[in-house]
Image (tube, helix red, strand yellow):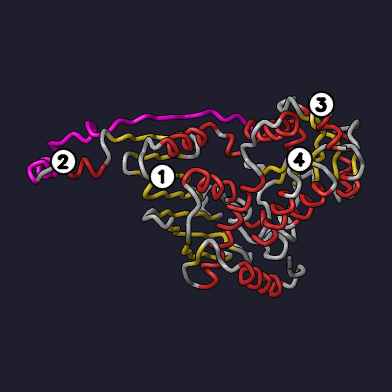
Amino acid sequence: MAQETQSAQVDAVRLGIIGLGQQGGMYAQLITQDMVPHMVIGAIADIDPAKRDLAAQTYPEVPVYEDYVELLESGDVDAVITTVPHYLHPEMGIAALSRGIHALIDKPAGVYTKQAKELIDFAATKPDLTFGMMFNQRMNPLYQRLKEIVESGEIGTVVRSNWIITTWWRPQGYYDSSDWRATWGGEGGGVLVNQAPHQLDLWQWICGVPKSVYSKLGYGVFRDIAVENEVTAVVDYGNGATGTFVTCTWDIAGTDRFEILGDKGKIVVENSKTATITRLVKPEPELSAGMDMADVMRLFTGQVDLNTLYTQEVFEAPSPWGQQHADVLENFARNVIDGTPLVAPGADGINGVRLANAIHLSDWLGSEVPLDFDEDEYLHLLNDRIREEGKFPQRAV
């Protein structure tokens, strides 16, 4: 059905929403508020009877299904979005693509790399279908501008990046809201797979994919949970550049600060809203080499005006509620209709999953690990934790 619709060059993609929870409900709202011009709701599926009743009342003209396979085989949709627990994303993505239906996967692409790769490899066998990720932050004008600045070389070669993002405060009641939340078997981890995937994606999208990582994690810090809610990770890019990533879910007065330091300038982002961009008049090594001891003494005594060595620009980009998500949906729809390039291709979903896995593995082993780590070892150690929980079946690919 999807292939017939695509060949007919329709004006709107019929989206199937699998899971009408907080995210699924948001996407439905954005579509019905006409924020996604080339998309309509084709059908909704949810295993929860209360959610199905809500869907039927709120969207009376939209078919509602109990089982997502029924939705996929109904002929009511051209594409789907998966707003379900993380472990189910690859399974549902493959099920859609195998039926000729385009797939937009909510973050993350999977819990572990072997699972995510199975989805990505299968999608590669369906080149006529659109496969995307809901990386809405890539639609944030602020981060798009930063990516342009870094890629253009305006701040030179990046030598260090740091992101501290601890604005995810989650009280115990949040974790008690569902049996699967904050479990190894149900959710696949903590802050790295739930709250921070967008930052893990943006960090690599802008600064590049690291070669290795060393990390220290805290599990159930001040909370009755088994998974990580405190993370400090140091990455090595293999070219002398390094980076740090710090996140947690128990800091009530959280911080969001992202720094990118290059040899020709620096970017500092506060609260994911305001960026201060510093551009040196010359690369820092040249400025250093041009100063003799007399210049150094003037520097130490405050006689050198550092403001003469660089310029600064403050950039702020508005981002209204829901606009980024709507933009990803619209970009996805346009790719289906006319081939508009995807801002967040599905294959990019492996990057965040791989880095999150490597951060876990480094802490579990107590050593630095490469990003091309042993995937079987990771899955074995993950299954050890799932087995210790005793709540969910172990995982395998």
Q: Which of marks 3 and 4 is nearer the N terminus?
A: 3
Residue 311 image label? none
The reply, left or right, for residue 178 in relation to residue 315 is: right
What secondary structure is found at the residue carrying circle 1?
A: strand
Q: How crowded is mark 2: few (under 14 residues within 10 Å), some or many (20 or more)?
A: few
Q: Where is residue 282 in the image (x, y as percent from the top left)?
A: 26, 36
Residue 128 image label? 4
What secondary structure is found at the residue carrying circle 3?
A: loop
- The image shows residue 311, relative to residue 107, as above or below, that is above
Classify the position of the N terminus by image quarter. Answer: top right
Which residue bears the numbered disc 1? 259
Where are the magenta residues, as a range? 293-322
Q: How far apart are marks 2 and 1 (CA)?
A: 26 Å
Residue type at numbered disc 4: Asp
Depth order, front residue of 75/214: 75
Q: How far apart are marks 4 and 2 (CA)?
A: 57 Å
Q: Position of residue 369 (x, y in %)?
A: 50, 66
Which residue bears the numbered disc 2? 290
Asked whether the beta carbons under mark 3 and mark 1 sit within 8 Å of each other, the answer is no
